[in-house]
Amino acid sequence: MPSTVAERAARLRELVDVRSGDHVMPIDAAIAAGFASAVGAPRRVTAEGEVVAPPTLITRMVSADRPEWYATMGREHLLHIAERQRFHRPLVVGRDLVWQSAITGVRETRGSDGRRLWIVASGYWFRDGATGEPVAEVTRTRAVLDEAA
């Protein structure tokens, strides 16, 4: 296993555009209700009477089931710097979301203090477990700091 951040970043470059296997996560009613209450989201219902979870619940899902490569970077060196969510349809409570993730880019740069860091972009693609239709896409960007001063 690579031991330095530079070695781990090099390994990440090998994984660019390699999609993970399917992850399956149900949109649980109790979790969605608790999350909605915590973020102050109003209760929403579709025209068909289905309860809709707050869209930001998808961030919780991604955070709860991180890709394997994420753990190899070492949290002490990782900084979340951006996230973008694009929805194709609502998150309906009671349905399963099936999703995949991949690293979409790795580039090296220098911080303002001169330290080396890597910008790691990743993507997450969610689809409805029953229909296979796209539900959402999430892109995340993280900075990984070199542990050497």
Image (cartoon, rainbow, N blue to C red):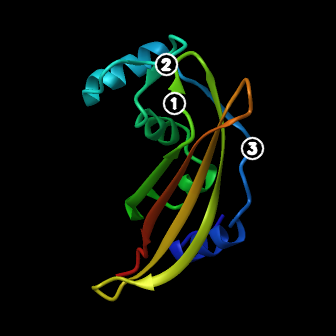
Q: Which residue is mark 1?
A: 90
Q: Position of residue 54 (x, y in %)?
A: 40, 29
Mark closest to the chain's N terminus, 1 or 2: 2
Mark 1 vs 2: CB contact within 8 A: yes
Mark 2: which secondary structure?
Answer: loop
Q: Which residue is mark 2?
A: 46
Q: Quadrant of the C terminus?
A: bottom left
The circle drawn on residue 8 is none
Q: Residue at x 70, y 27 (%)?
A: 129
Q: Residue at x 72, y 54 (%)?
A: 19
Q: Residue at x 62, y 61 (%)?
A: 103
Mark 1: which secondary structure?
Answer: loop
Q: Residue at x 61, y 20 (%)?
A: 95
Quarter occupied by residue 75: bottom left
Q: Amino acid at mark 2?
A: Thr
Label 3 crowd bin: few (<14), some (14–19), many (20+), radius 10 Å? few
Is residue 21 shown above or below 147? above
Q: Position of residue 40 (x, y in %)?
A: 24, 27
Mark closest to the chain's N terminus, 2 or 3: 3
Answer left or right for 76 relative to 95.
left
Mark 1 vs mark 3, CA separation in Å: 23 Å
Q: Quadrant of the N terminus?
A: bottom right
Label 1 crowd bin: few (<14), some (14–19), many (20+), radius 10 Å? some
Mark 2 vs 3: CB contact within 8 A: no
Mark 3: which secondary structure?
Answer: loop
Mark 1 vs mark 2, CA separation in Å: 8 Å
Q: Which residue is mark 3?
A: 21
Tell us which disc is closer to us: 2 or 3: 2
Tell us which disc is closer to us: 1 or 2: 2
Q: Amino acid at mark 1?
A: Pro
Mark 2 vs mark 3, CA separation in Å: 30 Å
